[in-house]
Image: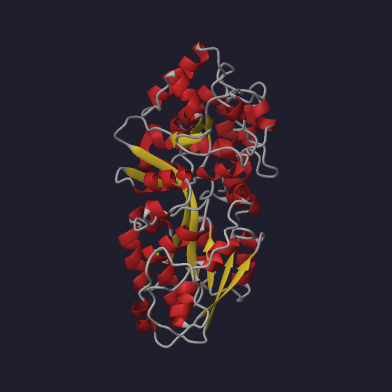
Amino acid sequence: MFIQPTRQRWSAALAGTLGVGLTLGMAACSSGDSDDEASVPSAAPVDCAQYTSFGDLKGKTVSVYTSIVTPEDKPQIDSYKPFENCTGVTVKYEGDKAFETQVLVRAKAGNPPDIAFVPQPGLLKQLVETGRAVPAPQQVSDNVDKFFGQDWKDYATVDGKFYAAPLGANVKSLVWYSPQEFADSGYQVPTTLDQLKALSDKMVADGKTPWCAGIASGEATGWPITDWMEDMMLRLYGPDTYDKWVNHEIPFNGPESTAALDAVGAYLKNPKYVNGGLGDVKSIATTTFQDAGLPIVDGACSLHRQANFYAANWDEDTKVAEDGDVFAFYLPGKDATTKPVLGGGEFTLAFSDRPEVQAFQTYLSSDTWANNKAAISSGWVSANKGLDVNNLKSPIDKLSAQILQDPKAVFRFDGSDQMPAAIGSNAFWKQATNWITGQDTKTTVDNIEKAWPK
């Protein structure tokens, strides 16, 4: 149902950024059973006693299946070492670019892994519907209540049963900019949508083309516009209406959807605003999302709305920091008192309730794992509230975690990733592309509504 390009917009952007080859140590783990404890200390002590309730796990194996592949897989695998050393369990890791189609095939065929890292709530529901998935143990449920909250728990709850804890996350509600340009021009980071519009107008008055954008992404061309529209739905109408829209409880061609797409058009279809350094409005359709923000460094544009994972696309000589060549600010809400956050993530869905599988699920849902993962990764963040932001490697990762941990933040998962495939990875992308090249808003939303499965 959910095809590979959906995941590609996250994982492909990260490729080449995560090859950090450190190994977690067990300085604070008291089991003492491993002969190969690493010398690098972990970010957080591991309480091995918490796993004794699962029984003697020595010699057991847990299989993990995921779309997280080289080079992202190494810090994932290394982050499991404290658990393996505590329990004697071996985690068998399998990364596969075809994960999103193959995991469903394997589940239906009765050959699922012990645990799958599922990147969309819609796919998670499909996997549960095969009858092969098992609900999460109480320890995992308790950890999610403590470290993530109800918003995240709901995404992995099917027919009243909770199945999977969140793993990694991303923040899409960001605008990339040049801190030096802002300082030189006296620009202030906006805290409301009105201020964002005023800033854009000010840049135009200063002789600049403020925004740059690109939506080309192979078979997934068009997806960046879906993110823009989802962000606007959240900001203009709030999370409850957003949920109704995603679940088709209100029509895609209703007044809310129409207004949200028009709000995107006020930026992306405004020839005064785009496409700085790249061409006219139509050039957005032929510019890859990877290249779209790069003119910021040359001063050809000033603003680019894209997720935290866009950090992977800057040249290695480009400093990504609040005092660097480029950085990002939170895409503001309608007012400064609200903080809607659009993003994505993965969930640890199990197909076995063996004790070693439940123990590993518990570890992955803990603050301990989140901090250990942060200590050896770059370009990674979690919504886990027990994550110490200071353990994160890069300024953009820290900013993302701060946004996710903000008490005012209301998180919503990427809408197109939750919609039926006929919409989320087909009609929505294609009609958004037609829209940016000249199709009017009414035709666009009408066509998407017509494509919705009956």
Evaluate whether residue 298 shows in this view: yes
440 w.r.t. 429: above or below: above
Residue at the image position 57 percent from the left and 46 percent from the top: 424
Percent across and percent down for residue 442 are 55, 27
| Residue 3 relative to residue 323: left or right | right
Task: Out of 87 and 409, give the one closest to the viewer.
Answer: 87
- For the view shown, which residue lies furthest in the front direction? 39
Residue at the image position 59 percent from the left and 31 percent from the top: 444
Q: Quadrant of the N terminus?
A: bottom right
Give the image quarter of residue 295. Answer: top right
251 w.r.t. 148: above or below: above
Circle count = 0
Residue at the image position 47 percent from the left and 71 percent from the top: 25
Percent across and percent down for residue 126 are 54, 62
Residue at the image position 44 percent from the left and 52 percent from the top: 392
159 w.r.t. 422: above or below: below
183 w.r.t. 433: above or below: above
Task: Out of 157 and 300, give the one closest to the viewer.
Answer: 300
Evaluate whether residue 248 shows in this view: no
Percent across and percent down for residue 219 are 69, 45
| Residue 117 relative to residue 239: left or right | right
Q: How is the image coloured?
A: secondary structure
